[in-house]
Amino acid sequence: MNKSYAFALRVINLYKYLTSEKKEFVLSKQLLRSGTAIGALIKESEHAQSKADFISKMNIALKEANETAYWLHLLKDSDFISEKEFESIYSDSEELLKLLVSIVKSSKKNLKK
């Protein structure tokens, strides 16, 4: 999934900015972990052992995307990133969340058939 890879790169760049410019190391590390895990889990799901395994991996990716949104909100509300910076990356995170919700829902529906 190219969107998750591009998002991971944005998260890495934000992490670099936060650690070098803002000297923020705790929230940014959490963001880095969850924000890059999304794409890794999606990549992992490409070789899932079963449909249930695929759904499980996508569900975990969805949880990581949701957690990433949480860290982004915390970074904005604690003034480590501006409203503009937040909106820019948050819109990408929302798009990933919506895609993952859709994938999980349709996969679960197809599993029951």
Image (cartoon, rainbow, N blue to C red):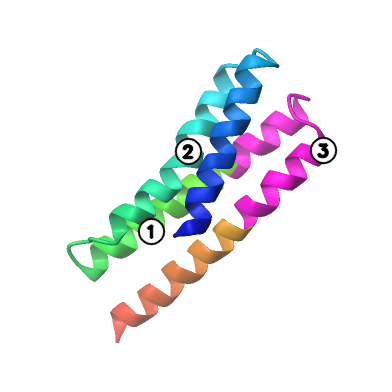
Give how far apart the Cα atoms at labels 3 and 1 are: 29 Å
Where residue 93 sits: x, y (%)?
61, 51
Tell how many labels.
3
Amino acid identity at mark 1? Met
Q: Which residue is mark 2?
A: 34
- Classify 100 as above or below 32: below
Q: Residue furthest top?
A: 23
N-terminal-most mark, 3 or 1: 1
Q: Residue at x 69, y 29 (%)?
A: 75
Q: Is 15 on the left-hand or right-hand side of 48? A: right
Mark 2 falls on what kind of element? helix
Q: Quadrant of residue 55?
A: bottom left
N-terminal-most mark, 2 or 3: 2
Give how far apart the Cα atoms at labels 2 and 3 are: 21 Å
Asked whether 2 or 60 is in front, the reply is 2
Q: Which residue is mark 1?
A: 58
Mark 3 falls on what kind of element? helix
Q: Quadrant of residue 112?
A: bottom left
Where residue 30 sits: x, y (%)?
51, 29
Amino acid identity at mark 3? Glu
Q: Residue at x 42, y 52 (%)?
A: 61
Query: What main secondary structure does the magenta stretch of the protein show?
Result: helix
* Crowdedness near tag 2: few (<14), some (14–19) or many (≥20) residues, C-alpha within 10 Å: many
Q: Residue furthest right?
A: 83
Q: Residue at x 56, y 57 (%)?
A: 97
Where residue 82 sits: x, y (%)?
80, 32
The label shown at residue 3 is none
Where residue 4 sits: x, y (%)?
49, 53
Tell me where the magenta segment starts and ends, as one range: 69-94
Q: Which residue is mark 3?
A: 83
